[in-house]
């Protein structure tokens, strides 16, 4: 006990760094539950936390932080529950076709490259207000030449198909329903009808005014820099990616340069660093001013103002909010004469982000951003404390870039592979040749364009900016074209990422020799990942697609349709193939064999369903149309039956095959359709 007490006392100077970790554990527990906690249960958790807090005063100095940590875990749990209830808004529980009216609040592009609009103040025909979604998102397909150009705040109308947000494509997959819940997105759909303007843009909201400024800046950039270069410029300044081609996006992803598109910590850090240095140099060049004012603090304040403007200009998405908070903490530390870059500063930023958006914990942006930042601060802090140099002065910038890229890449690679099932083998090379260009050319040129804009000379800065962005695009295209540039890995189990996070944080935050214990969960996590087995069968939530694992890979029941589901299944399998190739593996008999003598049959279309006359034991029949009531001894799964199950995974076990549905994995939560239907009854 004395030995444990001494180890715990070693942590006294670094306890605050564990606050966001404890909060994250509580938030994670809330999202892992398979039931929605009731108010009495939430009050019980709160009461237990208060009791623990009162009991902590009677414990010794060594063990008191452990109890306080449990209180913070409970606080994170309650915070996530409050946020989930606070954003509650109506979600569609039926498919709707008819007039849709609303105000344009966002523009982007879908995975199929179609223009997509997000509307609020939604009006649906014959749908009462209390059942109308807060927001809907509609992709514009077909001939839209007669459509009005969507503008921020413009009130529009179209005729559209709108459906509830889709669930995970397989049990344990990315939960779009949960993501949509926290974005108050109650319906998604598409329209092939021209978009009509029914009211001019509103002028009374500052968010829409900023939106219009973003659109104007994007239009100006595309005027000066056409094509993908201009689309890239718009993405890194306003956050809008609708003007960059799908091919360029694929090249950037394959070369591990896609993070340069998202306005994240890198962009915010480069911008504020450049502005900070520029202001300090400017003040230093004016001796009377430099002798009378605190140049460092003024430069930090000016950089903070610029960062706030960049946040507003980017649209204020979650990634940019997170980056701004981290930069604001660092600059505030400079103004308060504290160390700007430290694990404590990273912890403060993480606490603020989790307080504002606890659901961000589940996203790859939060995980990768804080993993990279924590690793960089820990490594460079270790080098500083142990006086590890980086060579002669002329080599220090190059060595710093090499270390930064390597450390950040290693810290984020497992997270990226877990979420996106891909590893870019030449990503380090691509980043080493691109990130310096972003910091030395693109960001300074963007600031120059802003300064020259009132004089009508912004084209000078934009032209220089285009040179740097063109280089990055060419690097991305070259690296993506190399043999073996990218490989795919199968998805990990549910416990893998939490174990990786625990081991990583233990290595970075724990003090003393026992920090090496953090290596154990890391090794165990990668072992579990390697041993993870993919389902032998997969069934889409509406019965539109079925997949069976074969020795050659996943066989899909059809070559076209449900492309998003097919792509996700194949990526989660770690396959770099397309739907057509996978469909060629499907047996001509339409009945795919499963372990234990089970056969899986897919009936696609009304004709196939109408010809169905029944089946025998040992068969699983899936249809994308309601099946007729015929005598059958097999398991029948049609849209009506799948409605209360979601997507289904078929797992091979010693005693045969077992079916696991999305509902089995997620349970009845606020954002699930079965919970919402129960509330309406």
Image (cartoon, rainbow, N blue to C red):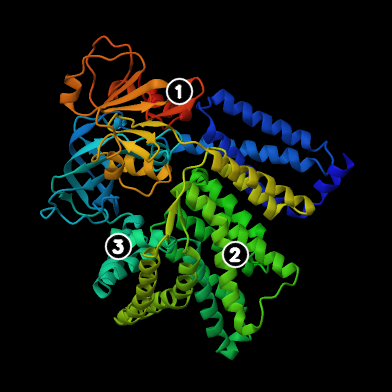
- The label number, if any, that marks residue 658 in the structure image: 1
Structural crowding at the residue carrying mark 2, measured as other residues with C-alpha within 10 Å and reported as few (<14), some (14–19) or many (≥20): many
Task: Give the x, y percent position of residue 91.
Answer: 34, 33
Residue occupying the far right of the picture: 2
Badge 3 crowding class, 10 Å Cα cut-off, few under 14, some 14 to 19, many 20 or more, is many
Q: Which mark is residue 244?
A: 3
Lower position in the chain sequence, tag 1 or tag 2: 2
- Select label 1 or label 3 by which is in front: 1
Q: Residue 573 at x, y = what percent?
A: 42, 42
Q: Where, by quadrant of the figure, is residue 670 drawn?
A: top left
Task: Identify the residue at horizontal 30%, vertical 66% (top origin).
Answer: 231
The numbered mark at residue 330 is 2
Pick the front one: 116 or 49: 116
- In this rendering, the answer to whether 607 lies above or below 465 is above
Q: Tell me residue 243's x, y (percent).
A: 28, 62
Q: Is residue 429 visible?
A: yes
Q: Is residue 668 left or right of residue 117?
A: right
Q: Earlier in the sequence, mark 3 or mark 2?
A: 3
Question: Is residue 228 depicted above or below 609 in this figure?
Answer: below
Q: In which image quadrant can residue 389 be found?
A: bottom right
The outermost residue toward the left is: 146
């Amino acid at each position: 006990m004395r030995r444990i007490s001494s180890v715990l006392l070693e942590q006294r100077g670094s306890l605050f760094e564990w606050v966001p970790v404890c909060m994250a554990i509580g938030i994670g527990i809330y999202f892992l539950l398979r039931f929605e906690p009731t108010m009495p249960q939430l009050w019980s958790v709160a009461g237990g936390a208060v009791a623990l807090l009162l009991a902590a005063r009677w414990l010794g100095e060594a063990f008191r932080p452990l109890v306080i940590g449990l209180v913070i875990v409970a606080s994170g749990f309650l915070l996530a529950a409050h946020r989930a209830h606070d954003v509650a808004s109506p979600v569609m529980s039926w498919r709707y076709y008819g007039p849709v009216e609303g105000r344009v609040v966002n523009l982007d592009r879908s995975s199929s490259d179609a223009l997509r609009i997000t509307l609020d103040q939604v009006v649906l025909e014959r749908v009462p207000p209390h059942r109308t979604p807060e927001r809907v998102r509609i992709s514009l397909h077909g001939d839209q030449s007669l459509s009005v150009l969507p503008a921020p705040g413009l009130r529009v109308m179209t005729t559209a198909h709108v459906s509830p947000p889709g669930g995970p494509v397989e049990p344990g997959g990315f939960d779009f329903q949960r993501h949509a819940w926290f974005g108050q997105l109650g319906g998604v759909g598409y329209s092939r009808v021209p978009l009509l303007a029914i009211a001019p843009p509103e002028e009374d909201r500052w968010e829409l005014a900023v939106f219009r400024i973003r659109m104007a800046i994007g239009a100006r950039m595309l005027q000066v820099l056409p094509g993908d270069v201009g689309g890239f410029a718009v993405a890194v300044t306003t956050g809008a990616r609708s003007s960059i081609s799908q091919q360029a996006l694929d090249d950037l992803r394959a070369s591990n340069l896609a993070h340069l598109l998202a306005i994240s910590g890198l962009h915010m850090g480069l911008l504020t660093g450049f502005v900070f240095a520029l202001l300090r140099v400017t003040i230093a060049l004016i001796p009377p001013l430099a002798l009378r004012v605190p140049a460092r603090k003024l430069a930090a304040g000016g950089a903070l103002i610029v960062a706030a403007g960049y946040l507003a200009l980017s649209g204020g998405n979650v990634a940019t909010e997170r980056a701004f908070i981290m930069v604001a903490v660092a600059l505030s530390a400079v103004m308060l004469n504290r160390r700007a870059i430290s694990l404590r500063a990273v912890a403060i930023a993480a606490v603020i982000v989790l307080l504002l958006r606890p659901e961000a914990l589940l996203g790859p942006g939060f995980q990768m951003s804080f993993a990279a930042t924590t690793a960089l601060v820990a490594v460079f802090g270790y080098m500083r404390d142990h006086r590890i140099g980086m060579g002669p002065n002329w080599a220090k910038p190059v060595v710093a870039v090499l270390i930064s890229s390597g450390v950040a890449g290693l810290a984020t690679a497992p997270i990226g592979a877990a979420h996106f099932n891909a590893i870019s083998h030449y990503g380090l090379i691509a980043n080493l040749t691109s990130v310096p260009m972003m910091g030395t050319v693109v960001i300074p040129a963007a600031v120059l364009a802003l300064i020259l804009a009132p004089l009508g000379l912004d084209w000078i800065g934009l032209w220089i900016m285009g040179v740097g962005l063109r280089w990055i695009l060419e690097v991305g295209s070259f690296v993506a074209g190399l043999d073996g540039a990218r490989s795919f890995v199968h998805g990990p189990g549910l416990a893998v990422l939490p174990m990786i996070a625990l081991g990583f944080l233990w290595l970075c935050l724990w003090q003393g020799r026992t920090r090496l214990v953090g290596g154990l969960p890391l090794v165990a996590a990668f072992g579990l990942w390697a041993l993870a087995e993919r389902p032998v069968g997969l069934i889409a939530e509406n019965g539109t697609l079925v997949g069976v694992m074969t020795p050659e890979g996943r066989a899909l029941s059809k070559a076209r349709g449900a492309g998003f589901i097919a792509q996700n299944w194949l990526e989660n399998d770690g396959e770099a193939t397309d739907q057509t190739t996978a469909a060629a593996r499907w047996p001509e008999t339409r009945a795919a064999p499963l372990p234990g003598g089970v056969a899986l049959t897919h009936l696609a279309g009304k004709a196939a369903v109408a010809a169905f006359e029944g089946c025998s034991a040992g068969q699983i029949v899936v249809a994308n149309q309601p099946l007729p009531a015929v005598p059958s001894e097999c398991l029948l799964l049609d849209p009506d039956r799948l409605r209360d199950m979601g997507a289904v995974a078929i797992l091979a076990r010693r005693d045969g095959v077992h079916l696991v549905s999305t509902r089995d994995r997620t349970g009845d939560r606020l954002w699930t359709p079965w919970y919402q239907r129960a509330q309406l009854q």
